[in-house]
Amino acid sequence: MSRYGRACRLFLLAAATLSGVMVSAMAVELPAFPVEDDAQRALRVNDGDLVFLGNPPAKAVHHHHNNIVIDRESLSSGWVAIHQCHDNLDVFDRVEIVFDATRVAELTVLNFAGIARAEVVGASVQLEGVRAGARLCIALRSRALWPEGDRFELRNGPYMRKFLDGYYPMHVTMDVRFPPDLLRYTGVDPKPQTGFDVRNESGAVMLDAWFEGRLTTRVQFQAMPEAAGAP
């Protein structure tokens, strides 16, 4: 990788976008892959359109996992607790994970492996000496839950793994926990399909996506009678 570049930025945002909020939005700006035949590359490279992958890549790719906890206070404040891990990070001397300071609080590095240094600086996590197969776990609070009358929506994304010449496969999983006496899961956008598995049970919904391009998810809930008056 050294001859193609040695630094990148991961953007993990919590900033307003359209009518929503990006909660674990990820854009990995990496150098282009080695030069190959232009026609072959044009056929292979995704230009940003969301494509779910029915067959996950044989080679390990960046896996972004979120454990998200919605509690009673979240219904009025919009803030949720997130435990976030990144596996199979790309090899670079320096990586900067940047958050929107207006939408993130209590940012903490929990643990890391295959990384020489990981440090919170303001609303960012600074990494040095990222080796192949590196892992990083962080914790934060993010304003991600939005009321719509007697409904709530958990908005996440866009997630992406972007090289200079296009978008490449990524694996995103999400485990959302919520109080079943206050909320009832009603659906998710995009709809479940090949390459995007959604499972739900009382008080929990789990998403598992293999894709190329840009993925934004919106998990919808109906307020139970006790929570219907939450702003």
Image: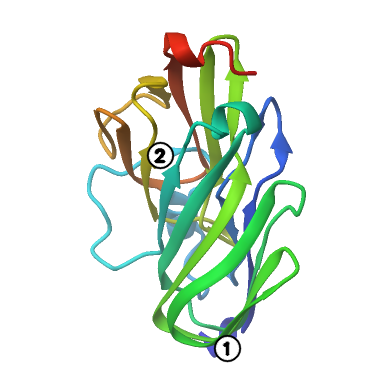
Q: Residue at x 57, y 88 (%)?
A: 3
Q: Amino acid at mark 2?
A: Val
Q: Residue furthest front?
A: 226
First reached walking from the N terminus: tag 2 or tag 1: 1
User: Is 59 situated above or below 117?
Assistant: above
Where is residue 45? Give x, y as percent.
Answer: 47, 53
Tell me which residue sits at (44%, 65%) in the image: 86
Q: Is residue 92 above or below residue 227?
A: below
Q: Is residue 156 visible?
A: yes
Q: Residues within 10 Å of mark 2 (few under 14, many from 20)?
A: some
Q: How many tags in the picture?
A: 2
In the rendered image, the vertical position of residue 144 relative to residue 118, given as above or below: above
The colour scheme used to paint the residues is rainbow
Q: In the rendered image, which residue does mark 1 sit on?
A: 3
User: In the drawing, what numbered circle is on residue 51?
Assistant: 2
Amino acid type at circle 1 is: Arg
Residue sitting nearer the eye, 116 or 46 = 116
Q: Residue at x 71, y 43 (%)?
A: 15
The residue drawn where x is 65% and y is 18% is 231
Instruction: Decide if residue 40 is on the left or right side of residue 145.
Output: left
Question: Which of the 4 image quadrants contains residue 65?
Answer: bottom left
Task: Give the camera-side residue of 167 and 89.
Answer: 89
